[in-house]
Amino acid sequence: MFKSFILLVMSFIGLDSGTFAQHNITKTIQSFGAKGDGKTNDTEAFTKAAAFFNDRGGNGTLLISKGIYIVGKQIPGNGDVYKNAYTGVDILAFKNVQNLLIQGEKETILKYTDKLKFGSFDPVTGKIFNDNSRVIPDPKYAASIGTCIGLNNCRNITIKSLILDGNNKSIIKGGTYGDVGVQLAHIGIYINNCHAISIDKINASYFGLDGIEVANIASGEPDNINISNTVLEYNCRQGLSWVGGNFLNVKNCSFNHTGRSAYNSAPSAGLDIEPEVNTISNGNFENCQFINNTGCGVVTAGNKASNCQFKNCTFWGTTNWSFWISAPAFTFTGCNFYGSIVHGYNANNEIEATRFISCNFEDKVYNGITPYGQFLLECDGPRRILFDSCNFIIHTKAVLWLNTGNAKSNEEKATIRNSHFIMPKKEGLNSPLSIPSINFFNNTTEFKN
């Protein structure tokens, strides 16, 4: 009788028994056995926590208190030709979960254990294997480390106040795996087909692959992936790889020093916008840094990525381009470029054009390193590229390599307007106002001794 009454009440308020059971719950990582003492390997505690929230579909909070949590475990294939040589265990892997908060503290650190294998290894002897150079290599030689936090088909997830240390300086690096370097999983946060994700106050650095990877397939609604106040530095392939999705919002983040730690794998960029799993659109980056990366500060690939805005960002290329632009509808407002940018999109219309508004270009030295490139910018062929109200400050480099000789009309030419050039007075150095195939309007030039 009592059970029937409960079912009747639940039916009346529009809830089934499964929904009724899944009220929000708060769990600590210690409740799953974690120590956080900087000595004990807590991998099992984290995998138990993920399994708990996966079983209930989320709806709760996982609290990870201050401490150093050692993580990382590999499962050997023991020579089985159907298995990888070593398979890394994902630490917090969530699937089909919603309404979950993963909350750390200022000094909450998840650090990978020493001497994990990464790359190509002999599946029988466990020794480094150096003859696996095919673009699609034999998986039986693969040694992956795995993902620290993985989100797969999740919604309304917040990850906050964590330091994720990939510890790549202590990795045992094997032979090449993939087209270049080591293209295997060792990622701070992996986001796959998720919506309404918030990442705040995260430091995901020193990983063998990427700090964060976003790999969404467009579903017809905005992804609304939000990353703020986050540091992605000293990773080996990318700070952030965006390989599919729309509406990625990034604010107050650092994508610096990629490939400056143990080793590097191409493209070794701060940010790679490369539509591998699907198209990319509507990226918004504000107050971000892309400094001193082995590869480009930012690199784009093809016209399947479009409509990205960069506002008040700093790009500083020391050994490579500050920005490699090959995608349509990229706009930069109030940004600083130290080190040459390259390309620009060959736009068919004004909407597709690469635009720079109130930006500064300067060959400014970084910690004694001369910025990359022979010119402030080296753009050959991008129709309709626009520089409006910009400053070009030259110390030792040449001014511009900017040629739109392929333009069929004045509208298709490069345009520089309302801009100011500050340059040394040298014999034989021409004013930028005489560069051919460019529209100049209301610009000024200041020569300095």
Image (cartoon, grey):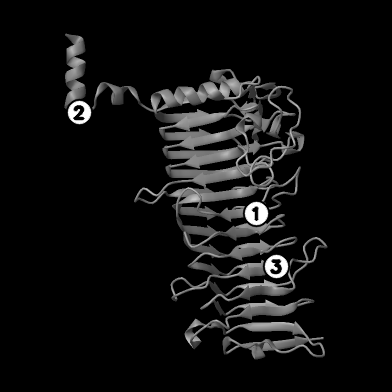
Q: Which residue is mark 1?
A: 269
- Quarter of the image for residue 162 reads top right
The percent position of residue 68, horizontal first and vertical second, equals: 67, 29
Count of numbered badges drawn on the protein: 3
- Check the picture and name the quadrant holding the N terminus: top left
Labels 2, 1: front one: 1
The percent position of residue 442, horizontal first and vertical second, equals: 57, 90
In the rendered structure, which disc, 1 or 3, sits on the residue that comes first in sequence? 1
Between residue 75 and residue 286, name the one nearer to us.
75
Q: Amino acid at mark 2?
A: Ile
In the rendered structure, which disc, 2 or 1, sits on the residue that comes first in sequence? 2
Question: Under tag 1, what secondary structure?
Answer: strand
Which labelled disc corresponds to residue 338? 3
Q: Which residue is mark 2?
A: 13
Report whether 445 appears left or right of 427. Answer: left
> In the displayed image of the protein, which residue is found farthest to the top?
1
Q: Residue at x 73, y 35 (%)?
A: 174
Between residue 222 and residue 136, name the one nearer to us.
136
Q: Is residue 426 above or below residue 306?
A: below
Q: Amino acid at mark 1?
A: Ala
